[in-house]
Amino acid sequence: MRKLVLGLLVTLAIALVGCVTINVYFPEAAAQKAADQFIGNVIDNAGPAKPVPKDPSQATESSSQHPSAMLLDLLISTAAAADVPNIRIQTAATEAISGRMRDRFQGALGALLDSGAVGFTRDGMVAMRDAAKVPLSQRAEATATVADENRDRSALYREVASANNHPEWEPQIQATFAKGWIDRAKAGWYVQNDVGAWQQK
């Protein structure tokens, strides 16, 4: 009788898992939360980014359960986990990028943003907005700073997509970060609106 019950439970569990459609969609809310955390760490120099907390529904049950019940829980929770949005943003590469960005925000890039020479674009990059605000002798350095920042931003968006095993998410990651950079821009900085016009925050 016990074997029959166990067999029925396993069959039921497999059938349930088979009925679950696993949709791989871009977890927009989780991505925005992760992007905001990364951006806050860079702009506010808040220290190392904290990992995005895991959903409590992913916790496993107590080992005191009957083995067949544990198997059923495991199979169902594995299937359900596919619907729990989560995004990985911390890797060795993103930590290195974060450090370089923080240094630029504390130095040359921060000064360029404060002066209004440079602003955040609507596509998640930075651009020279008004070169006349930069002394002629410093323009080459300012151009190099903008290029370095944009190189790191492109690498960041690509790395986050790859770290989540979805390189095709890169455009959505970039769009998510673009919104985050603009939202977190400090008062007085320039940002582009939806049609690409510059506005001061």
Image: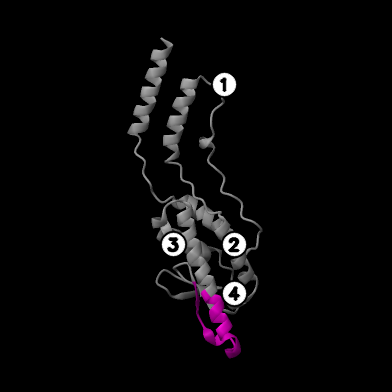
Q: Looking at the picture, which amino acid does disc 3 mark?
A: Ala
* Relative vertical location of residue 50 with respect to residue 189 in this rendering, above or below: above
Between disc 3 and disc 2, whose residue precedes? Answer: 2
Residue highlighted by disc 2: 96
Determine whether label 1 and label 3 are within 8 Å by CB: no
Between disc 1 and disc 3, whose residue precedes? Answer: 1
Q: Gap between marks 1 and 3, in whole Å? A: 46 Å
Colour convention: one colour
Please state which of the two labelled residues, at mark 4 or mark 2, is closer to the viewer. 2
Q: Looking at the picture, which amino acid does disc 2 mark?
A: Ala
User: Label 3: how many residues lie within 10 Å, few (<14), some (14-19) or many (20+)?
Assistant: some
Q: Gap between marks 1 and 2, in whole Å? A: 43 Å
Please state which of the two labelled residues, at mark 1 or mark 3, is closer to the viewer. 1
Disc marking residue 150: none
Q: Position of residue 53 (x, y in %)?
A: 57, 45
Asked where in the image residue 3 lies, by quadrant, the reply is: top left
Q: Gap between marks 1 and 4, in whole Å? A: 57 Å
- Mark 2: secondary structure: helix
Disc marking residue 109: 4
Q: Is residue 127 magenta?
A: yes
Please state which of the two labelled residues, at mark 1 or mark 4, is closer to the viewer. 1
Q: Is residue 150 magenta?
A: no
Q: Looking at the picture, which amino acid does disc 4 mark?
A: Leu
Q: Gap between marks 3 and 4, in whole Å? A: 21 Å
Residue highlighted by disc 1: 64
Disc marking residue 175: 3
Q: Gap between marks 3 and 2, in whole Å? A: 21 Å
Asked where in the image residue 48 lies, by quadrant, the reply is: bottom right
- Mark 4: secondary structure: helix
Q: Main secondary structure of the magenta part?
A: helix
